[in-house]
Amino acid sequence: MGIKKNKFSFCMLIFLLFLQMHSVLALYEDEIGKHDWTRQFVGRVQHLEFDLPAGTTTKQRSQQLQGGSSSRRLFVATDHNVLAAIGLKSSRIIWRHFLEDAPVNGIKLCDGALFSMSNGLLRSWSTSRGILNYEISVQEQLEAKFAGTLTCHEDPDDDRSLVFASTARRLVAVAPLTGALEWAANLDAGSGENHSEVTSFPNPDGLTVVTFDPTAGKMRLHQFGAESGVAKRTATVKAEWLTSLQRCAISVSTLACLDPAGSVRLLSLSSGSDFKPLPPSLVEQLGHAGPWQSVEEIGGQDLFQLTTNSGAVVAMLDASLATGPTGESLPAGSLLRYRGQVRFLLRQQGDGGGGVTLEASSSSSLVASNKISLSFASHHGRVSQLYPVTFVRKGGSSYGYRVVMTTRDADLHAFDDTGERQWMREESLAGIVSVEAVDLPSADEDELVTPGGSVFSSFAQRLSGQVHHFIHVLQHLMLCWRARPASQADSLGEFGYPDEAPAPPASAASSSGSGAGSLIRDEFNLHKLLVVATKDGKLAALDSATGRSVWRLMIPMPAAAAAAEGTAADSARTEARIEPLAGGQMPLYIQRTTAHFPLEPMATVLCRDSSTGRPVLFSFNPITGIGIGLAQRLQSRLLQALLVPQPSHDNGQYIRPLMLLSDTLQVTLYPAKTALPHGFKSLNLYTVDRDNRLLQGYRLRLTEQQQQMSAISTWRLALHEPILVTAARRPTEQVHSVGRVLGNRHVLYKYLNPNLLAVATLAKDMVTPAPQIGDAYTQITIWLIDTVSGRVVASATHHHSSGPVSLVHSEHWLVYSLWNQKQRRFQLSVWELFAGNGLRDCMNATQPIVGKQSYILPAPVQHLAVSQTERGITAKSVLLALRSGGIMELSKAFLDPRRPFDMTPEFQEEGLMPYHPEVPMSTQAIVNYNQSLHRVEGMVTVPTGLESTSLLFVHGTDLFCTRVQPSKMFDVLKADFDYAFIAAVTIGMIIGSFVTQRLAARKALFRLWS
Amino acid sequence: SCEAAQSAMRNEPTAAAAVPNSASLAAAVGIRRRWAIEFSLLHHRSPASQSRHYDSLSTATAQLAAPAGYMDRPPPLAGGREPDGALISKRGWDAALGPLKQLPMNLFIMWMAGNSVSIFPIMMVLMLFMRPIQAVFAMQATFAQIEGGQACLQRFVYLIGNLAVLALAVYKCHTMGLLPTYESDWLSFVDSPRRTEVSGGGFLL
């Protein structure tokens, strides 16, 4: 009995312990989200499906809808190859999957499950939890291109539905529920042609598949019934003029394609064997003859939308060229979509921001026809895609609709049928290209006075600075007071933040409403503004403490110059937009910091105008997000740009000039009126040419007058191998100690050349014999190049190695990761460069002593970064973004080429660890604990006012920001420091010393008397 | 017992003279014989010659020989005596060689203390530093005692001895690694080299 009772209580104890499980899922649970924040995104939406079907379909569906309206969600596939479910009400990510690095060809909801097609694989997902039901390989052998198409065939008569998934060579029909293969058909049928593109569309009794061979210019049509894999009709059509199926749109019975001249050619899928031009009667009716910019299918029944170069939109109805085409002309910037019987027409004026109206009209009385206006902020740009959906309202008597749309900046918006925005997801932040951290303006007056002035000028400067400060504070207070009633409405309309961001404090909403009022630097300068530029040409500032967007701004298009007019024909093809420069670069330059108070800070972004390909410069205030002047289009292409390290003090503007090197080796400064600071005798620039595998160095000669500046090419280095990545030391990096102390108390001096560039190249491995199976090995070569002289300082080759290579160079060392093909593992290598033992040697050392060591990394790594502190005293940490989603902080002490194999007391004295081939990976070193970060594109570390602390900002599909302390917090007392105890002890000691002094004096007096 | 008292009386000024102190010297000068008992007269007295005795009292003293150890004069004051040159020189050497004599002892203590930088060895090293420094500061007072022909040499030896102790302390600091004698100790004062060339760039824009 007693044993039984014991057992019972033991079981109860275990049960109670399990109940407490949630509270111990993390170390220091109270610190989660205290110093860090995460924002999760999906990327630019490319395919979207609603989990509620179009309002007028089968009975079964509407019943299902009425039953489960609480779980309304939308499924998206994005350019980050993410498949996700987003709550239609909450905008929250319900589940999210990162698919392999291949574009998602399409997603479809079929029979209650979600299907996706990518990389030649058909996958079925459970809609509620995102669990993978099954996966079918559509392709039989590996195809080079990941073309694919996905359709769902639903037979209205019987409940049997089929999923058709097709690559360019093979079509499969799958029963959606079971995943059983119904039939399969080969599309190329041994023709020997290389069909690499495919598109398909369901027709009433089956499917039409069109494959295309762009090299031969041949197109083949296949029409299949639902019941068997024997094609009902196959036809080959010649289309040499067509470059890609991307310029075509397919509907039930018509294929409409654009030829290079921009005119539309139509092909009847049921009977036609050749393309026909648009009938003249229709052209007359439309009032536009072309050239057309794009053609889109907009909702079944052979409805196409054609867009002309002037931006006008035309909807065209065409029933296989037999029943007589009809067309309708629409104003510029319109989007037309059909959902069943309901027609949605979105009109927008100008370049976005100028009022968007949506008209919903229906031929039946299902949806009340109405016209609503949607409010947008201008920084979103135009609406680029419109996804409407209709649904049965709760009572079941009436129908409503929702509209989800993407704008040019990739943000995702949802509106209801009253025109009220329900939510907005800042998906533009998933495409961050460059990041710069800006110190917030200081409330401290020390920085008002510039050094080096006379007493009176300093005094005057200080007085005027104080007055400016006072006026600024007054203005801010006024603004706050005025914005108070409006801020609530504003925060709903404009700043309806996604829910997964941390809950906004009350002050944050008002601060974002009234500009950058509350953005004052904190005591340790830990609070910064992260200015980011996205690949869609958008600028934004994120608060480093909360992750909230403080301001957002679309880079404006520069005014059309006379030179741009000449290329009007080019701009006709595509809509002119701002895009990153070659290689996805979009550098940000902080030209004036916040330290010069009455002058506002200034940042400049360098990007490209997609229509002309000319570089565009745009300056703005990084704190408020207000543009400074207009965007400037440069007349010539740029080779490279360099921000001069010091501001010029000449005209009291404190602007660091941006030096632009054009392809004709002309050098200009931006802003044009700034002068170079004194003391610069020469400036060097280098360019890395990926295409030509060439490194080139230039030297800028500065004449006394600085009227004309020119560059001369000083060195060229042809590497003859594809260049993978490069890494250079950060120009602002501080080095505290110039040497390393050895165990015998001598010094090994570091080779501190600030102009080193590390380059990784890939080549075929000629040494290691090829493996039995698979391709021959490759090798990675790491070069260390002095960018002033072009000299190769050091180099090393890793045989049987391949990318991904990630490089990081700091102080006197270089750390990189690569894949060892032979051992099949990731490796981490470190180089340290030393100048020698004597100080005199190191001053004029030309050839460093290079120590190298490699380690096994037990996990795949995507990116490397290094922590940065203000004075460089703190030990460094290497930050590794692991493929598993963790960010690991690894002390540099583990990566040290001096780690000995045999330990001696001298090495022990130096604090070296014995060499161990494996890098230790502890879960406590993961700085983002359980907040996995996927598709990390870059990591930025920023020094703060605390020497021990540096900020880490990780961007990619997810954003993450935290504080990193490589040597722990040595300069700040711990949070649990016992102030009261220390104070009591100190005061007690002081009082005690006074009392004992008195007592001693009295005793001495008594002794004298006695 | 009277002999003992007398000898005590004689000894007192001698002891005072041995101390070269002006105050005790003055005290010794102030001491005079206050009383004396004439034992010889009591011995030789007879009843018949009582009256004669009293009559011839003054002549009897002249006739009788003084007993052994008796001195008619008051005991001499020692302060008045001339100092012994050899003794002074010996004492001088004692003072001068003091620090040098302590040196082996200090060596042993320091060897025992070890080379670890912790509180007790540090305290010992500090003491080792303090003593010669204090001695050097109090050198004037010490040198005032040392007289004689070899005073110069003795002072010099005294100084050398203290310096030797100081050197021992410095050596101890060195073995403990507390002396900034290596390059690494001055590393934080070495400025990082100034950047003479500015270079920047990247991939082609």
Image: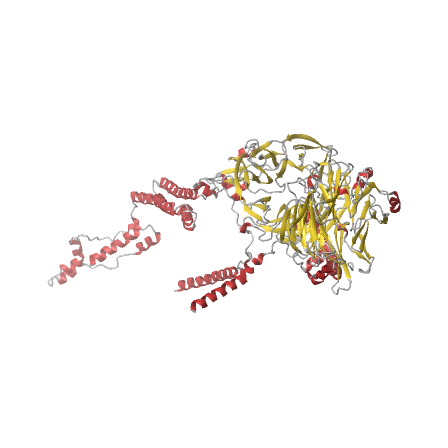
| Place of residue B3 in the rendered image (x, y in percent of width and height, measured from the top left) | 20, 56
| Place of residue A764 in the rendered image (x, y in percent of width and height, measured from the top left) | 59, 33
In the image, A641 versus B108, the foreground residue is A641
Measured along the vertical axis of the image, is residue A649 above or below residue A69? above
> In the shown orientation, is residue A849 left or right of residue A628?
left
> In the shown orientation, is residue A997 left or right of residue A527?
left
Q: How many marks?
A: 0
- Which residue is most to the left? B48
Measured along the vertical axis of the image, is residue A852 above or below residue A360? above
> In the shown orientation, is residue A96 left or right of residue A631?
left
| Place of residue A814 in the rendered image (x, y in percent of width and height, measured from the top left) | 57, 39
Residue A597 seen by the camera: no
Residue A87 seen by the camera: yes
In the image, A739 versus B80, the foreground residue is A739
> In the shown orientation, is residue A345 left or right of residue A468?
right
Residue at the (77%, 64%) spot, across then down: A397
In the image, A989 versus A641, the foreground residue is A641
- Residue A611 found in image quarter: top right
Q: How is the image coloured?
A: secondary structure
Quadrant in which the C terminus of chain A is drawn: bottom left
Measured along the vertical axis of the image, is residue A690 above or below residue A109? above
| Place of residue A724 in the rendered image (x, y in percent of width and height, measured from the top left) | 63, 37
In the image, A216 versus A504, the foreground residue is A216
- Which residue is most to the bottom? A1
Quadrant in which the N terminus of chain A is drawn: bottom left
